[in-house]
Image (cartoon, coloured by chain):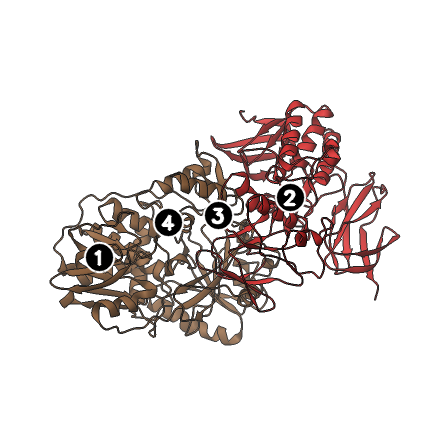
Chain colours: A red, B brown
Amino acid sequence: MTLPTHVDVVIVGSGPAGLAAAIRLKALGVGTVAVLERDPRPGGVPQFCAHSPYGLREFRRLMSGPAYARRLVAQALAAGVTIHPSATVTALHPGPRLTLTTPGGPAELTATRVLLATGVREASRVARQIGGTKPGGILTTGALQRLAALGQPLPFRNPVIVGTELVAFSAILSCRSAGVTPRAMLTETSGTTARWPTGIFPRLLGIPVHHQTTVTAIHGRDQVTSVTLNSGSDLPADGVILTGQFRPDAALIRTSHLDWDARTGGPVTDQTGRCTDPAYFAAGNLLHPVETAGWCWAEGGQIGSAIAASMTETAPATIPIHLSGEALAYVTPQSIAPGLPATLQLRVNRRVRGQITVNGKTHSIDTRPQRRILVPIPALPDDAPDLTITLRERA
Amino acid sequence: MPTTLPDTEFDAAIIGAGVIGCAIARRLTLEGWRVAILEKARDVLDGASKSNSAILHTGFDAPVGSLEQKCVVAGYAEYRAIHQRLNLPLIESGALVIAWNAEQESALPALMDQARANGVDVTPLTATQTRTLEPALGPGVAAAFRVPQESLIDPWSAPHAYLLQAVENGATLLRDCAVTGGHFDNGWYLETTRGPLRARVTINAAGLYGDHIDQMLTDATTFQIKPRKGQFIVYDKPASALATHILLPVPTAVTKGVVVCRTAYGNLLVGPTAEEQDDRENATLIPETLDALRMRGEQILPGLASQDITAIYAGLRPATQFKDYQISRDAARNYICVGGIRSTGLSSALGTAHYVHDLCAAMVAATPLPDPTWPQMPNITEGPPRSCDQPDNGGIVCHCELVTRAEIAAALASPIAPQTLAGLKRMTRVTMGRCQGNYCNGDVAAMMAAR
């Protein structure tokens, strides 16, 4: 489909958040809604996760990732959304105006509103500061699943899996369907991080789980031959699967005029997903690493509604939120638009027991990293002072 | 890969397709020689040349009167003269040599004198002037001087261009071709892993194995390679806004020290370390050393603390027990050894190639090519138009580095087409960005397998 030169709303990214917002925008009567997807196939990450459970929240049934992605794409197209695959946005400008590149060449697109829904990526070996050599056979879960989806052979038979976030179990399932037997699962923490399935799951499949274990070095010239663990011992393996440690894919934001939050790695927004340029919005895992497809879908829908409401309104001045307490990893949103209720989402960077005070209310918490803490905030007046979130830990 | 080699006598066999070997191949080809380039690896630029700091040095800090200084000056001048004809980038960033304490400050006048003796313009700067030029610098700047002509280049397009110009004008590239022995008997009879090869002249540009080849072919060597490892950190593109100039420390006797500079690809580089080791193959990454490097980088530019790291890499420089280059001629045996090109090879290569030709010109009667072809290198650097800015580019494959399907297809169809993913990375930058290939390695593998 030919790219338009102007649309009412352009959405960057066709994962669950972007498509849910697009569908909602059309349902609310917005005229032209275009979704730009850099991949040749729309649907985002779920299309590469060939296992359940997807779709419970959205379609009230258990679906595989690819079936779920196809369903969302079909629903968007039926709603009148145009989807442009193989379209890579290369810069965001005030206006709003986007520059992009397509197989046919460069292009520009203006819009009344832009929604950024570019998702997350897992930390590479670089971000994890793993030493040693640079042989083949080191992949993230995302890369593993893309290879499997492209029908390509996996570059190992007996890799180690690093991490026990939910996505690590996705990696196990992908290995199993490709006939690959992980040698071990390594986790920094003393118990598994993911809520589901529990740590019993890998053991049921005969995969040993090593707790409080990290990889300090990878060895091998052309192919991985072994890894060194923090205990000092070597573990033979022909590959390494790096799972989790998600970061928002925010490169476009960091080189743009929009404010960026070093804590989340995503853009600064208010509770409606609105960025510091009020013509720009953001949704999904770009805001917060990392939530499920279902969460992103729900959030995309809400932010779609907010965009529809914003088309004719001017943006209110927002109220900033400050964090006090070094164990607080981040908060989203980073500011509050007055006159609308909000739900703050907090995360901690280690096991924390104590009390959180915000807006005069105190909440007891007993939580681990990776678990979200939700704090409702009633609508604030226009002249409300800055909000500060204070964490006091129990000794 | 065909296993039989041409059964004719080449004018020159150049051992090693690093930046030096590629530049010598170009020079001798342009002088009318029939050249074979013998590379033991599956792809070119696979040894010392695969990692460097991508700076075109003026030679301001080289020892006055050294061979290194002479070659760097000549190499710098020729690069400036030819880069536009080959469509190679030149980013005239300038460099600042920064003193961070009184002791370093006291060393600046002698360094400026040395630069002027080497014919390089320098301008002294106060701490305030330095900070005006580079507002993101950390606290503690005592003084500095500016070297306006230090520049940034693309460390891979340049040697690829030299090699491509040689090959397009008749040179023969032989990869997977390690030299295993040889003797001179009114001409060289070389033994290689791909069979015998004859040449009038043999030129040893074997980099990290220069002393081994020297020993093998001449039964003696005057230098020993002592690999010096350099680890580097590459920051993601937004970090490049933190510095305009190449930021150099006051050098010590051993090393130029940790450099902070932009790259031609729009990233920011911090490195290298200087660690002596015996292993000539493996440059291992050491997290503790990289941590120290990162902290040094954050002292120089505190803004780096909130920037993402895109890549870490380590390379080996072919240092010897000597400070200067070890280039020698054995006129009786038509043999030139180009050894110990320890850290300025990218800057000096074209000049070194001229020097080598001067040494061996009398060994072969040849007439310079009257009208050589000049290949146009595809631009892979940030700034000038790239494939992704052109119509019909086939779409982006590597989104981090904006590498298109058309660019990869062109690299794979080139006369010096890479045989490995590592070679393709060096030619196109595919998989070199912030996701480290986790998005596109499947597509890239499919394209390589399909050709």
- In the image, is B314 to the left or to the right of A67? left
Mark 3, residue position: B431
Residue A290 image position (x, y, % from top left): 68, 47
Q: Chain of mark 2?
A: A
Q: Chain of mark 4?
A: B
CA–CA distance in space, label 4 to label 2? 34 Å
CA–CA distance in space, label 1 to label 2? 56 Å
CA–CA distance in space, label 3 to label 4? 16 Å
Upstream in sequence: badge 4 or badge 1: 1
Upstream in sequence: badge 3 or badge 4: 4
Amino acid at dot 4 = Ser
State the residue at coordinates (33%, 42%).
B414
Q: Are marks 1 and 3 on the same chain?
A: yes
Residue B402 visible? The answer is no
Residue A304 image position (x, y, % from top left): 72, 33
Name the foreground residue: A271 vs B35.
B35
| A254 lies above or below B47 | above
Determine crowd level at label 2: few under 14, some 14-19, many 20+ residues with C-alpha closer than 10 A: some
CA–CA distance in space, label 2 to label 3? 27 Å
Determine crowd level at label 4: few under 14, some 14-19, many 20+ residues with C-alpha closer than 10 A: many
Amino acid at dot 1 = Ala
Q: Are marks 3 and 4 in contact (CB under 8 Å)?
A: no
CA–CA distance in space, label 1 to label 3? 34 Å
Q: SS class of the residue under badge 1? A: strand
Amino acid at dot 3 = Thr
- In the image, is B249 to the left or to the right of B339? right
Mark 2, residue position: A258
Mark 1, residue position: B13
Upstream in sequence: badge 1 or badge 3: 1
Mark 4, residue position: B157
Amino acid at dot 2 = Leu
Q: SS class of the residue under badge 4? A: helix
